[in-house]
Image (cartoon, rainbow, N blue to C red):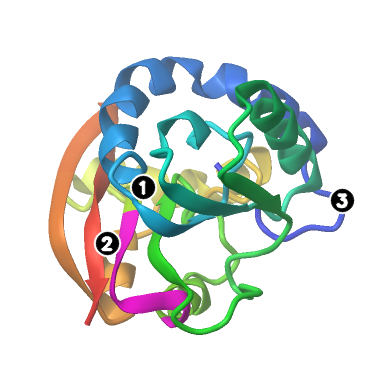
Amino acid sequence: MSAPKSKQGHRWFAAMWDRISASQERTTGTKVRPKIMGEAHGDVLEIGAGTGASFSYFPEDAQVIAIEPDPHMIERAHKRLAKLGAVNIQLRQAAAESLPFDDDSFDHVVASLVFCSVDDQAKAFAEVRRVLRPDGTFRFWEHIRNDDSRFWGTLQDAITPIWRWCGAGCHPNRRTQQAIEEAGFTVEWIEKFRAAPGTPEIYGVARPG
Protein backbone atom coordinates (compact mmCIF):
# COMPACT_ATOMS: atom_id res chain seq x y z
CA MET A 1 0.00 0.00 0.00
CA SER A 2 1.40 3.34 -0.93
CA ALA A 3 1.37 6.33 1.33
CA PRO A 4 0.18 9.69 0.05
CA LYS A 5 2.68 12.30 -1.03
CA SER A 6 4.87 13.35 1.87
CA LYS A 7 8.42 14.63 2.16
CA GLN A 8 8.84 12.86 5.49
CA GLY A 9 6.88 9.74 4.56
CA HIS A 10 5.57 7.27 7.12
CA ARG A 11 8.54 5.56 8.75
CA TRP A 12 6.61 3.43 11.25
CA PHE A 13 4.03 2.33 8.70
CA ALA A 14 6.73 1.30 6.23
CA ALA A 15 8.53 -0.64 8.97
CA MET A 16 5.36 -2.55 9.87
CA TRP A 17 3.75 -2.99 6.47
CA ASP A 18 5.27 -6.32 5.46
CA ARG A 19 4.16 -7.86 8.74
CA ILE A 20 0.71 -6.29 8.52
CA SER A 21 0.18 -7.56 4.99
CA ALA A 22 1.87 -10.97 5.29
CA SER A 23 -1.34 -12.97 5.74
CA GLN A 24 -3.08 -11.14 2.90
CA GLU A 25 -0.13 -11.72 0.59
CA ARG A 26 -0.12 -15.47 1.34
CA THR A 27 -3.81 -15.81 0.55
CA THR A 28 -5.13 -13.08 -1.75
CA GLY A 29 -1.79 -11.89 -3.11
CA THR A 30 -0.77 -15.27 -4.47
CA LYS A 31 -4.10 -15.44 -6.32
CA VAL A 32 -4.35 -11.87 -7.60
CA ARG A 33 -0.80 -10.80 -8.38
CA PRO A 34 -0.12 -13.50 -11.03
CA LYS A 35 -3.08 -12.13 -13.01
CA ILE A 36 -2.40 -8.45 -12.45
CA MET A 37 1.40 -8.34 -12.61
CA GLY A 38 2.20 -11.75 -14.04
CA GLU A 39 0.40 -11.07 -17.32
CA ALA A 40 1.90 -7.61 -17.88
CA HIS A 41 4.48 -7.87 -20.67
CA GLY A 42 6.39 -5.13 -22.47
CA ASP A 43 6.79 -1.67 -20.96
CA VAL A 44 5.15 -1.63 -17.52
CA LEU A 45 4.62 1.06 -14.92
CA GLU A 46 3.81 0.05 -11.36
CA ILE A 47 2.22 2.81 -9.30
CA GLY A 48 2.74 2.66 -5.55
CA ALA A 49 5.28 -0.15 -5.37
CA GLY A 50 5.36 0.03 -1.58
CA THR A 51 7.98 -2.38 -0.24
CA GLY A 52 8.07 -4.34 -3.50
CA ALA A 53 5.55 -7.14 -2.95
CA SER A 54 4.85 -7.27 -6.70
CA PHE A 55 8.41 -7.59 -7.92
CA SER A 56 8.67 -11.37 -7.99
CA TYR A 57 5.48 -11.67 -10.05
CA PHE A 58 6.53 -9.65 -13.10
CA PRO A 59 7.51 -11.74 -16.15
CA GLU A 60 11.16 -11.60 -17.19
CA ASP A 61 10.32 -9.96 -20.53
CA ALA A 62 8.61 -7.01 -18.80
CA GLN A 63 10.58 -3.77 -18.56
CA VAL A 64 9.21 -2.36 -15.32
CA ILE A 65 9.46 1.08 -13.81
CA ALA A 66 8.07 1.02 -10.27
CA ILE A 67 7.30 4.31 -8.55
CA GLU A 68 6.64 5.00 -4.87
CA PRO A 69 6.31 8.42 -3.17
CA ASP A 70 7.21 7.38 0.38
CA PRO A 71 11.01 7.44 1.00
CA HIS A 72 10.79 4.80 3.73
CA MET A 73 8.78 2.43 1.56
CA ILE A 74 11.10 2.85 -1.40
CA GLU A 75 14.14 2.20 0.80
CA ARG A 76 12.69 -1.19 1.68
CA ALA A 77 11.71 -1.80 -1.94
CA HIS A 78 15.34 -1.25 -2.99
CA LYS A 79 16.47 -3.89 -0.49
CA ARG A 80 13.90 -6.38 -1.78
CA LEU A 81 14.87 -5.68 -5.38
CA ALA A 82 18.56 -6.22 -4.61
CA LYS A 83 17.77 -9.50 -2.88
CA LEU A 84 15.60 -10.62 -5.80
CA GLY A 85 18.26 -9.68 -8.34
CA ALA A 86 15.74 -8.63 -11.01
CA VAL A 87 17.51 -6.51 -13.60
CA ASN A 88 14.31 -5.63 -15.47
CA ILE A 89 12.85 -3.47 -12.67
CA GLN A 90 13.77 0.15 -11.96
CA LEU A 91 12.68 2.07 -8.88
CA ARG A 92 11.90 5.79 -8.82
CA GLN A 93 10.42 8.09 -6.22
CA ALA A 94 7.34 9.77 -7.69
CA ALA A 95 3.64 10.34 -6.99
CA ALA A 96 0.68 9.02 -8.97
CA GLU A 97 -0.78 12.49 -9.50
CA SER A 98 2.31 13.73 -11.36
CA LEU A 99 3.92 10.94 -13.36
CA PRO A 100 7.32 11.94 -14.80
CA PHE A 101 6.78 10.15 -18.12
CA ASP A 102 5.77 11.09 -21.64
CA ASP A 103 2.34 10.40 -23.07
CA ASP A 104 1.77 6.86 -24.39
CA SER A 105 4.85 5.46 -22.66
CA PHE A 106 3.57 2.14 -21.31
CA ASP A 107 1.83 -1.02 -22.47
CA HIS A 108 0.46 -1.61 -18.96
CA VAL A 109 0.01 0.32 -15.74
CA VAL A 110 -0.44 -1.81 -12.63
CA ALA A 111 -1.45 -0.90 -9.08
CA SER A 112 -2.25 -2.91 -5.97
CA LEU A 113 -3.89 -1.41 -2.89
CA VAL A 114 -2.78 2.06 -3.94
CA PHE A 115 -5.74 4.21 -4.95
CA CYS A 116 -7.17 4.13 -1.45
CA SER A 117 -4.34 6.41 -0.40
CA VAL A 118 -3.51 8.73 -3.30
CA ASP A 119 -4.27 12.36 -2.53
CA ASP A 120 -6.35 12.94 -5.66
CA GLN A 121 -7.89 9.90 -7.35
CA ALA A 122 -9.23 11.76 -10.38
CA LYS A 123 -5.88 13.37 -11.13
CA ALA A 124 -4.03 10.09 -10.63
CA PHE A 125 -6.35 8.20 -13.00
CA ALA A 126 -6.00 10.98 -15.57
CA GLU A 127 -2.24 10.50 -15.37
CA VAL A 128 -2.63 6.74 -15.82
CA ARG A 129 -4.63 7.34 -18.99
CA ARG A 130 -2.09 9.83 -20.25
CA VAL A 131 0.93 7.51 -19.98
CA LEU A 132 -0.89 4.41 -21.26
CA ARG A 133 -0.68 3.54 -24.93
CA PRO A 134 -4.07 3.46 -26.71
CA ASP A 135 -4.16 -0.35 -26.70
CA GLY A 136 -2.70 -0.64 -23.19
CA THR A 137 -4.28 -1.92 -19.99
CA PHE A 138 -4.69 -0.65 -16.47
CA ARG A 139 -4.44 -3.62 -14.10
CA PHE A 140 -5.64 -3.09 -10.55
CA TRP A 141 -6.32 -4.62 -7.14
CA GLU A 142 -8.11 -2.38 -4.63
CA HIS A 143 -10.38 -2.47 -1.60
CA ILE A 144 -13.57 -0.42 -1.87
CA ARG A 145 -16.53 0.93 0.06
CA ASN A 146 -19.18 -1.67 0.89
CA ASP A 147 -22.23 -0.33 -0.96
CA ASP A 148 -24.03 -3.66 -0.56
CA SER A 149 -24.43 -3.15 3.19
CA ARG A 150 -25.68 0.04 4.77
CA PHE A 151 -24.14 -0.96 8.10
CA TRP A 152 -20.66 -1.71 6.78
CA GLY A 153 -20.63 1.23 4.39
CA THR A 154 -21.63 3.64 7.16
CA LEU A 155 -19.01 2.12 9.44
CA GLN A 156 -16.33 2.61 6.79
CA ASP A 157 -17.39 6.25 6.43
CA ALA A 158 -17.27 6.74 10.20
CA ILE A 159 -13.79 5.28 10.72
CA THR A 160 -12.17 6.87 7.67
CA PRO A 161 -10.74 9.95 9.48
CA ILE A 162 -8.89 7.94 12.11
CA TRP A 163 -8.11 5.06 9.73
CA ARG A 164 -6.57 7.53 7.30
CA TRP A 165 -4.32 8.85 10.08
CA CYS A 166 -3.28 5.38 11.25
CA GLY A 167 -2.98 3.86 7.79
CA ALA A 168 -0.74 6.34 5.98
CA GLY A 169 -3.59 8.01 4.12
CA CYS A 170 -5.74 4.93 3.43
CA HIS A 171 -9.45 5.67 2.84
CA PRO A 172 -11.49 2.48 3.40
CA ASN A 173 -14.62 4.03 1.89
CA ARG A 174 -13.52 4.97 -1.62
CA ARG A 175 -15.60 3.89 -4.61
CA THR A 176 -12.60 3.12 -6.74
CA GLN A 177 -14.31 1.12 -9.49
CA GLN A 178 -16.64 4.05 -10.08
CA ALA A 179 -13.65 6.40 -10.16
CA ILE A 180 -11.91 4.21 -12.76
CA GLU A 181 -14.97 4.32 -15.01
CA GLU A 182 -15.48 8.05 -14.47
CA ALA A 183 -11.89 8.60 -15.59
CA GLY A 184 -12.82 7.20 -19.01
CA PHE A 185 -11.70 3.60 -18.67
CA THR A 186 -13.72 0.64 -19.89
CA VAL A 187 -13.54 -2.32 -17.54
CA GLU A 188 -12.61 -5.42 -19.52
CA TRP A 189 -13.11 -7.81 -16.62
CA ILE A 190 -13.41 -7.52 -12.88
CA GLU A 191 -13.67 -9.87 -9.90
CA LYS A 192 -15.15 -8.86 -6.56
CA PHE A 193 -14.59 -10.71 -3.31
CA ARG A 194 -14.50 -10.12 0.44
CA ALA A 195 -11.14 -10.66 2.07
CA ALA A 196 -12.08 -9.21 5.48
CA PRO A 197 -15.44 -8.78 7.26
CA GLY A 198 -17.44 -6.07 5.56
CA THR A 199 -14.61 -4.99 3.24
CA PRO A 200 -15.03 -5.80 -0.47
CA GLU A 201 -12.02 -5.97 -2.76
CA ILE A 202 -11.83 -5.89 -6.53
CA TYR A 203 -9.22 -6.80 -9.09
CA GLY A 204 -9.36 -6.64 -12.85
CA VAL A 205 -8.30 -5.04 -16.10
CA ALA A 206 -9.50 -1.83 -17.72
CA ARG A 207 -8.62 -0.12 -20.98
CA PRO A 208 -8.64 3.54 -21.99
CA GLY A 209 -12.04 4.40 -23.41
The residue to which callout 3 is attached is 8
Residue at the spot 78% in from the left edge and 37% down from the top edge: 75
Mark-to-mark CA distance, 2 and 1: 9 Å
Identify the secondary structure beneath mark 3.
loop
Instruction: Give me the disc on residue 142.
Output: 1
Looking at the image, can residue 144 be seen?
A: no
Residue at the spot 26% in from the left edge and 46% down from the top edge: 203
Q: Are marks 2 and 1 in contact (CB under 8 Å)?
A: yes
- Disc 2 or 1, which lies upstream in sequence? 1
Assess disc 2: are there few (<14), some (14-19) or many (≥20) residues with their C-alpha within 10 Å of its C-alpha.
many
Residue at the spot 52% in from the left edge and 31% down from the top edge: 53
- The image quarter containing residue 88 is top right
Image position of 129 with respect to 110: above or below: below
Mark-to-mark CA distance, 1 and 3: 25 Å
Assess disc 1: are there few (<14), some (14-19) or many (≥20) residues with their C-alpha within 10 Å of its C-alpha.
many
Q: Which residues are magenta?
A: 130-139
Image position of 7 with respect to 126: above or below: above
The quadrant of the picture occupied by the N terminus is top right
- Disc 2 or 3, which lies upstream in sequence? 3
Q: Nearer the viewer, residue 142 or 31?
A: 31
Q: Is residue 162 left or right of residue 104?
A: right
The residue to which callout 2 is attached is 177
Instruction: Give me the disc on residue 55.
Output: none
